[in-house]
Structure formats: structure tokens, C-alpha cells
Image (cartoon, rainbow, N blue to C red):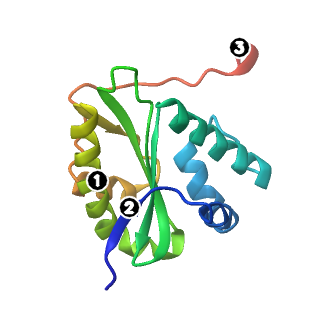
Amino acid sequence: MPEFTLRPFGEKDGAHLLHWYKTDAAGLQALFGPQTVLTEDYECIAAFNNLFEAVRRGHALFWMVDQGTDPLGFFTLTHIPPDRSTAMAHIYIEAAKRKHSIKAAQAIDDTLSAAMASAGMSRVFASVTGGEGALHLAKRIGFKPPEAVLLTKTLGMNGD
């Protein structure tokens, strides 16, 4: 079985991102969240451009996840404040290859620990929106539910 590794985003990787959007728009939508609309190719490209702009500004980090030489997803840390003490973790694995999620996540965990140590980060958060499998994966690599409960309320337009 080929080794799982992380590497920087490369010139040819844009085609993989667009392919994953075309075959798994719901998976990428879950990663980007409901505030980002992904119904057209150009919206997907804009969402990734926003992410790469955050990387350029130092508010995010981004790695491609490979199995051997084949890209199977990506890992990103976002919402990094100026003091670089915390970050939000996001993992995307191509839908057809999610059976490899645990091994890929273990490779990610090694890089995550190194990235945290070098940046002086003390906490990484994960918002799990991919169902029971995603929750199991997060727990398997060491994420724990917080001791406090965070509640949200969705507000409608014009008092709805």
C-alpha cells in the first residue's frame, strides 16, 4: 500500500480540485460551510482563491494529501489569528477514496503536530459537518468534544 504524505499545492493541482468539485460538490460544500455557495464551477474556483489568499496573508495553511504519487485530497488550517495560537482544521478526501481516510488522517496528524509546534499553536479546532464517519475520523486522530457547549441560532431575513 502506498504511503500517505502531505505536500505543498502545485501547479497541476487545480485540475484535481475542480474534478473533486464536479464529482463531490456536497463534500466540498460541507468543508467550506453554508456561507459559501458552490453551485457553479466559478464559485468553486472563487472559494479556493479566497482560501489561497488567506494562505498568502498567513491566515491559513494548505497541503495536498497524496497516496503514493496520486492526490486524494487536501488538508488546511484556517482562521489562524495574528498570534498564531489556534487554527481550524479541515480535511477533504476524494469521495471514491474515503476508505483511506484513517491512514490519510494519521499522516495529516504528524504534519499537524509539526506545523503546530513550529507556529507556536496550542489548540486546533475542527468543525465536523460530514456525518458520523467524519466525527469518527476526528475522534480517531485525537480531537475531543469541548467541555463547553456552543449553541447556534439561525436567523431568518426580515424576522422570519
What residue sits 70% from the left and 50% below the top?
44
Assign the N terminus to one quadrant of the image. Answer: bottom left
> Disc 3 versus disc 2: distance between alpha carbons?
46 Å
Query: Which residue has dot 2 on it?
Result: 6
What residue sits 29% from the left and 44% below the top?
115
Residue at the farthest front position: 11
Residue 14 in picture, x, y percent from top left: 65, 60
What residue sits 40% from the left and 20% below the top?
82
Query: Badge 3, how many Cα within 10 Å: few under 14, some, many 20+?
Result: few
Query: Which residue has dot 1 on it?
Result: 111
Q: Amino acid at mark 2?
A: Leu
Any part of residue 108 in sight: yes
> Disc 2 versus disc 1: distance between alpha carbons?
7 Å
Which structural element holds mark 3? helix
Is disc 2 in contact with disc 1, using a CB cutoff of under 8 Å?
Answer: yes
Relative to 141, is 57 above or below?
A: above
